[in-house]
Amino acid sequence: MEHGGQLAICAAAAVAAAVSVALDGRPAAGVLTAALEASREAETFRPPAKTFTMTACIEKVHRDLAGRNRLDVDEVAGHYFPDKPENIVPLAISLALVTESAEDTVLFAANLGGDADSVASIGGAIAGALCPESVNQSWFEVVSSINGDDILNVASSLATRGRAVSIGPYRNCFL
């Protein structure tokens, strides 16, 4: 993904808004609305480089996955293999909101192939913010012990140092 291009800017805005409102306790529908509004607003910051927008991609993937009776990894990968920008963040957001589980989102994403680590980390973060009880504590402990950091204190420190910025009505996004 071109990191300064419209798709990247819109994807970043959508993820930031999704995490922010999920942390504020909004339900999945509110998180989706926030992500779409932030992406739509971010479209004005860079001219479109493609015939589609990140907002449209998020809407399409979410509508499709939310309308399924059950999620099948092979079927989802066949439609939205995470090897291009228009699939990665829309898949992450959609999986998080459809499963409402950090653990389920990470496991599902890990089995997709492609840029599965991005889908898992972004989707897991959103789902974890939405439903903190769904974060697998033993996974967290393993990662923390291997990394040798105190990620909870790091996160707390960053949050207090962060400069709140406004992305539309989402005032809790930090830079």
Image: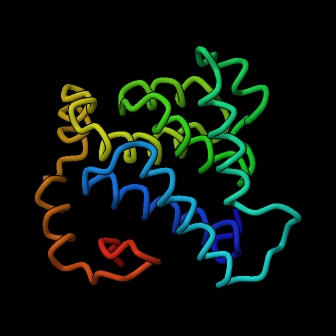
* Rendering quarter of residue 127: top left
Q: Is residue 12 above or below residue 89?
A: below
Q: Position of residue 151 (x, y in %)?
A: 18, 53
* Rendering quarter of residue 66: top right
What colour scheme does the image use? Answer: rainbow
From the viewer's side, name the closer residue of 61 and 111: 61
Quarter of the C terminus within the rendering: bottom left
Residue farthest along the right direction in this orientation:
51
From the viewer's side, name the closer residue of 66 and 120: 66
Q: Is residue 69 above or below residue 11?
A: above
Q: What residue is shown at x 73% (from left), y 56% (from top)?
A: 56
Q: Is residue 99 above or below residue 4?
A: above
* Rendering quarter of residue 40: bottom right
Q: Position of residue 135 (x, y in %)?
A: 26, 33
Q: Is residue 75 above or below residue 47?
A: above
Q: Position of residue 91 (x, y in %)?
A: 61, 41
Q: Position of residue 102 (x, y in %)?
A: 36, 33
Q: Indicate left or right for 20 with 63 as reference.
A: left
Q: What residue is shown at x 52% (from left), y 35% (from top)?
A: 95
| Number of on-image labels | 0
Q: What residue is shown at x 44% (from left), y 31% (from top)?
A: 106
Q: Indicate left or right for 129 with 73 as reference.
A: left
Q: What residue is shown at x 52% (from left), y 62% (from top)?
A: 14
Q: Indicate left or right for 106 with 175 as reference.
A: right
Q: Indicate left or right for 158 with 91 as reference.
A: left
Quarter of the N terminus within the rendering: bottom right
